[in-house]
């Protein structure tokens, strides 16, 4: 119980920090409603399950290698810039509209949100670095209780992400009735710009890790 609670509290503090997943939760919840939050979290959970499995197999030192960190940051940053620029471009071309009927295209939208959750998570180099350091410590502690302990830790951690993203999605989707297409487009453009800024920041950090740019 203490392991799950600790994982929940630490995970919640990380989930609340502004990042690409939060930006996508806001954008998709405004467009598709509350369900976008849990679906994005499901994709995030898939990425985290793969990371936990890798760490349990002893790969934490691999993710801390300078070249690996730099490459992840550079590629991840490029992906986020691509996603953010795509959002801004779609808004400019009028391709993003509010889904007033959430049932329309629900299956396709759900699959898109899950895939986006995976992609956004794995494109964030600081997410990987957190798991390679703080997360790896928790994995080692959890393995002290066997696979059950690892499962309890993972459950507590994912519940923190689900709690925050669901809360964020609820707050945004509850205000959808106050949105018109212009306000929605502006909000989406802001989220897209945020992703671009995050991507440039990550890519810049990657170039510094790789020694292409000076460390300071």
Image: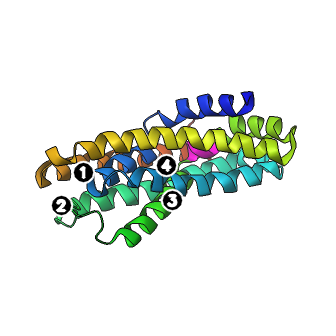
Q: Distance between the residues labelled 3 and 4?
A: 16 Å
Q: Residue 189 carries which label?
A: 1
Is 127 contained in the magenta span?
yes
Disc 2: CA contacts within 10 A as few (<14), some (14-19) or many (>=20)? few
Residue 202 location in percent, x, y?
49, 45
| Vertical arrangement, residue 105 with respect to residue 17, above or below | below
| Location of mark 2 (residue) | 92
Q: For residue 131, what is the image quadrant? A: top right
Q: Distance between the residues labelled 1 and 3?
A: 19 Å
Q: Which label's residue is closer to the chain start, 1 or 4?
A: 1
Residue 103 location in percent, x, y?
30, 67
Q: Residue 119 carries which label?
A: 3
Q: Distance between the residues labelled 2 and 1?
A: 9 Å
Is 200 contained in the magenta span?
no
Mark 2 or 3, closer to the camera: 3
Give the structural element (helix, strand or loop) at label 4.
helix
């Amino acid at each position: 119980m203490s392991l799950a609670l600790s994982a929940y509290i630490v995970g919640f503090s990380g989930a609340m920090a502004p990042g690409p997943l939060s930006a996508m939760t806001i954008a998709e919840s405004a467009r598709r409603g509350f369900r976008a939050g849990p679906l994005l979290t499901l994709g995030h959970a898939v990425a985290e399950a793969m990371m936990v499995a890798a760490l349990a197999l002893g790969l934490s030192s691999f993710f801390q290698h300078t070249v690996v960190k730099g490459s992840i940051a550079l590629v991840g940053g490029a992906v986020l810039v691509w996603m953010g620029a795509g959002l801004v471009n779609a808004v400019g071309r009028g391709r993003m509209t509010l889904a007033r009927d959430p049932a329309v295209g629900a299956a396709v939208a759900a699959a898109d949100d899950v895939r986006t959750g995976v992609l956004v998570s794995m494109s964030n180099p600081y997410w990987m670095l957190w798991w390679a350091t703080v997360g790896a410590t928790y994995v080692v502690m959890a393995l002290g209780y066997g696979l059950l302990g690892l499962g309890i830790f993972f459950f507590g951690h994912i519940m923190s992400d689900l709690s925050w993203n669901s809360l964020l999605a609820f707050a945004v989707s509850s205000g959808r009735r106050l949105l018109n297409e212009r306000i929605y487009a502006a909000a989406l453009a802001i989220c897209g710009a945020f992703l671009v800024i995050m991507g440039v920041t990550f890519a810049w950090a990657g170039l510094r890790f790789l020694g292409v740019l000076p460390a300071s």
